[in-house]
Amino acid sequence: MTMEEHSNNELSENTGENTSEAQTNSTENITEDISFSNRIDLSELKDGIALIKTEIEKVIVGQKEMIDMLIASILANGHSLIEGVPGVAKTISAKLLAKSLDIDFSRIQFTPDLMPSDILGTSVFNMKSSEFEFKEGPIFSNMILIDEINRAPAKTQAALFEVMEERQITIDGNKFKMDLPFIVLATQNPVEQEGTYRLPEAQLDRFLFKIDIDYPNLDEEIEILTREQNLKGGVKTDQITAHLSKAQINKFQNLVEQIRIESHLLKYIADIIVSTRSNQFLYLGASPRASIAILRASKAFAAMNGRDFVTPEDIKRAAIPVLQHRVIVTPEREMEGITTKQIIKQIIEAVEIPR
């Protein structure tokens, strides 16, 4: 090999090394330039939710799905109906959630003799001014827990229609706006039906979610007993600290509304809803209000996971709690023991997931 050839080979090798180094540096620069960040800053929301969960888990053992659903309903600015047998922490969970938030809270125990004025308020004659003054009822709060909602007659249940949907009430021709946020959490017992009044479909449709609560498993039951033993007469709710203010909750609700959802996912929601209307096992399918509820709920789930966009998994997660109280099984299938939850699962599996 001549000196010239040897020099050219070294030059070629050096050039190759330099090119390789340049490509590596270029790739590193490109990688550094790319930032996969959300369009919406959800860090405060995610941290706030983590604090709430930590507070509730100081008292409640298990029931993580129920807690997630309750938090999602608040973010989506919707109401929730909690159903479960007595003693599975329906009421205490709602109270703990309210106590972990720096908001006004009121509890209404529904009974057969409860009147609409006992909830909404009434006009009282003031002797000094010789005028009627409106005295607000317990519904004027930020979070309202309605215990055993199916205990009150239809007239009292109907008093909730306007306030749950429009966040206002009309008394003697005057409109009174609710202070925001305004969330109703209602409980009912599915077992004991004596002396109860079944909620009509129009009332059920006002609830964003119907949350079913099951019994705890063996390990959770042991943990419940252990905590009760260690409590030694103390009050459970004294352990809870309030974290989020009204302004923060309203801010989070506005952020959830800005979560992005692609057009093909909107069609996916519509396909699920339309499938309920043509299903041979269902006597009554879901209404457009149900599709809007899935949209809002799926945005809330996306935000809770730190994403500013909705995925098909968010929609699938929202479908059952949104739809199970809005559709009615045909009498024949109901006699066979088929539930709305089973039918909704089949519908979700049958509808093609968009890619």
Image (cartoon, rainbow, N blue to C red):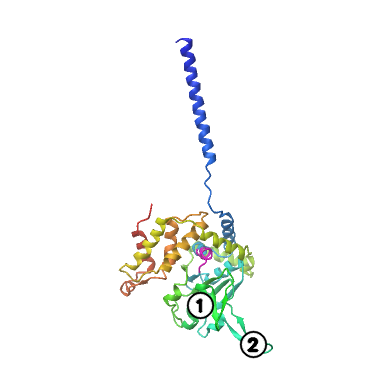
Q: CA distance from mark 1 to mark 2?
A: 27 Å
Depth order, front residue of 330/85: 330
Q: Residue at position x 52%, y 33% from top?
A: 26
Picture quarter with the N terminus = top left
Q: Position of residue 74 (x, y in %)?
A: 53, 65
Label 1 belongs to which residue? 160
Q: Earlier in the sequence, mark 1 or mark 2?
A: 2
> Disc number at residue 103?
none
Inspect this view and state whether residue 153 appears.
no
Disc 1 crowd rating (10 Å Cα; few below 14, some 14-19, many 20+) is many
Label 2 belongs to which residue? 131
Circle 2 — which element? strand
Q: Residue furthest right?
A: 128
Circle 1 — which element? helix
Q: Residue furthest top?
A: 2
What amino acid does circle 2 point to? Answer: Glu
Q: Residue at position x 63%, y 70% from top?
A: 235
Q: Position of residue 323 (x, y in %)?
A: 41, 67
Q: Position of residue 297 (x, y in %)?
A: 47, 63
Q: Disc 1, disc 2: CB below 8 Å?
A: no
Depth order, front residue of 30/68: 30
Q: Residue at position x 32%, y 75% from top?
A: 331
Magenta-colored segment: predominant secondary structure: helix
Q: Residue at position x 50%, y 76% from top?
A: 162
Magenta stretch contains residue 75: yes
Depth order, front residue of 261/325: 261
Depth order, front residue of 230/144: 144
Q: Position of residue 349 (x, y in %)?
A: 35, 59
Magenta stretch in the rendered image: 69-78
Q: Is residue 143 left or right of residue 337?
A: right
What amino acid does circle 1 point to? Answer: Leu
